[in-house]
Amino acid sequence: DLWQAEQSHSALESAGMRVRRREDLTAGIVRTWEICQERARAAAIAVRLLPRAAREFVEGIDIILDAYRSGDLTYTVLVAANGVA
């Protein structure tokens, strides 16, 4: 399972870290997955020649993109440091 940003935040604090910055980068990540989707579609013939694991990954791009667009999946960066400085 993937953790929500809040779970990661809590885990860092429980480990004695202090979260200094939190940034949701989901909007930028969506565009990255859109590019992946476009390129995978353009290379559909070549994708068929890839090993099964790679083909399954490519087949999952639409699901990943839908999850980001719906908000079910987010991309958050947490910056933490030891102590209270």
Image (tube, rainbow, N blue to C red):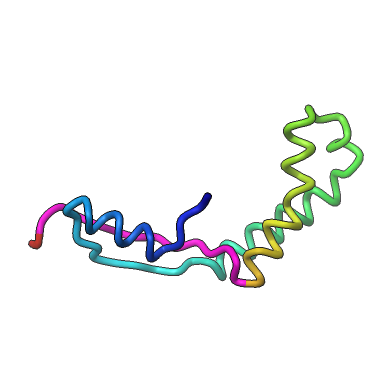
Q: How many marks?
A: 0
Residue at the location (63% across, 58% down)? 32
Residue 27, image quadrant: bottom right
User: Residue 20 placed where, x, y %?
Assistant: 23, 65
Work out whether 70 lies above or below 79: below
Work out whether 41 lies above or below 48: below
Please indicate whether residue 10 sits to the left or right of residue 50 in the image.
left
Q: Residue furthest left?
A: 85
Residue 48, image quadrant: top right
Q: Residue furthest right?
A: 45
Please indicate whether residue 2 sits to the left or right of residue 51 in the image.
left
User: Residue 15 placed where, x, y %?
Assistant: 21, 50
Q: Decide whether residue 6 is among the magenta residues.
A: no
Q: Nearer the viewer, residue 76 or 49?
A: 76
Quarter of the image that includes the C terminus: bottom left
Work out whether 2 lies above or below 10: above
Residue at the location (50% across, 61% down)? 75
Q: Nearer the viewer, residue 47 or 65?
A: 65
Q: Nearer the viewer, residue 44 or 22?
A: 22
Q: Decide whether residue 74 is among the magenta residues.
A: yes
Q: What is the magenta range?
A: 71-83
User: Residue 73 placed where, x, y %?
Assistant: 57, 63
Please indicate whether residue 6 sits to the left or right of residue 47 in the image.
left
Residue 71, image quadrant: bottom right
User: Residue 64 placed where, x, y %?
Assistant: 67, 57
Residue at the location (79% across, 37% down)? 55
